[in-house]
Image (cartoon, rainbow, N blue to C red):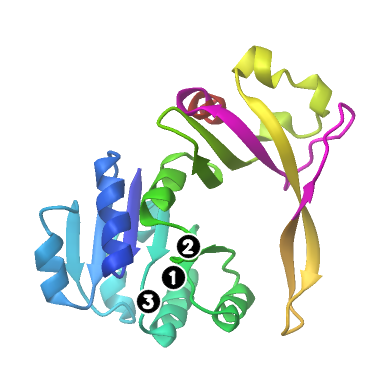
Amino acid sequence: MKFIVFGIGNYGASLATKLVELGHEVFGVDSDQERTEKLKNRITYTVAMDATNRDAIQDLPLKEADAVIIGIGENEGTIIMLAALLKQIGVQRIICRVTSTLQKTVLETMGINEFVYPEQNSAGRMAEQLSFGGVIDSHRVCNRFLFVEVIIPSRLIGSKVGDVDFIGEYEIQLVSIKRDVEEKNILGTLRHTKQTIGILTQNIELRHGDSLILFGDSKKLKTFLEL
């Protein structure tokens, strides 16, 4: 997979190098040339540039990337300007580092809906989430087993919980389901949020927009997601 990380300070550098360790191709972008030089042997490619310069960033393989991560932490204005440029260019998946509720609200009005909170999401954990296609969140219990929240595979939409043999066929456990609901943020903009269905019954229908909370061996989970 291919990722572009804007901002390779402490958090961005940790994320980029972990993704490389997991076997991915990573472009690390920063305005500080000293940082890019320091990390050029640990990240696939490093580029020193102004992230708010549209002409400069269009030289990057933005539309080929599986995700573009804005890991800039020290300048909220730059984050918002860069996010706007990436949306205009047509980047499909943008993940933004956020440090305040207001910043997140502004980004939501621009159509950004994936966020990372450095104080909650370690760079290593985020790298693992990106490595598993369709994973929204994860928590590793040990080297082998983990919990993951995943976007529902299209093949399961319309099925009932009891129709899918998660244990027998896939050797994983369905723990819960998160379902889309709409609510307004403080600016009055409608946004999608998730509510967790507590106790699952066999008759609950799996719907478009659901995310599944699964538990199992990392290899079995990856196989399930790649089918």
In the image, residue 14 lies at what x, y percent? 28, 58
Check disc 3 and give the amino acid type. Answer: Gly
Which residue corresponds to the image point at 18% horizontal and 62% vertical from the top-left? 46
- Between residues 181 and 122, which one lies in front from this camera angle? 122
Instruction: Find residue 160 and name its label.
Output: none
The span from disc 3 to disc 1 (Cα, nearest Å) is 17 Å
Which residue corresponds to the image point at 46% horizontal and 74% vertical from the top-left? 83
Name the front one of labels 2 and 3: 3
Q: Quadrant of residue 144?
A: top left
The span from disc 2 to disc 1 (Cα, nearest Å) is 8 Å
Where does the magenta region start and end?
195-220
Q: Is residue 9 left or right of residue 115?
A: left
Q: Is residue 2 above or below residue 201?
A: below
| N-term-proximal mark, 3 vs 1 | 3
In the image, residue 210 lies at what x, y percent? 73, 45
Which residue corresponds to the image point at 51% horizontal and 43% vertical from the top-left? 139
Instruction: Find residue 86 and name its label.
Output: 1
Element at label 3:
loop
Q: Is residue 196 left or right of residue 86?
A: right
Q: Do the residues labelled 2 and 3 touch (CB within 8 Å)?
A: no
Q: Are marks 2 and 1 in contact (CB under 8 Å)?
A: yes
Q: Badge 2 is on which residue?
A: 94
In the image, residue 35 lies at what x, y percent? 16, 70
**221 inside magenta stretch:** no
The answer to whether residue 67 of the structure is visible from this angle is yes
Q: How busy is the neighbourhood of tag 1: few (under 14 within 10 Å), some, or many (20 plus)?
A: many
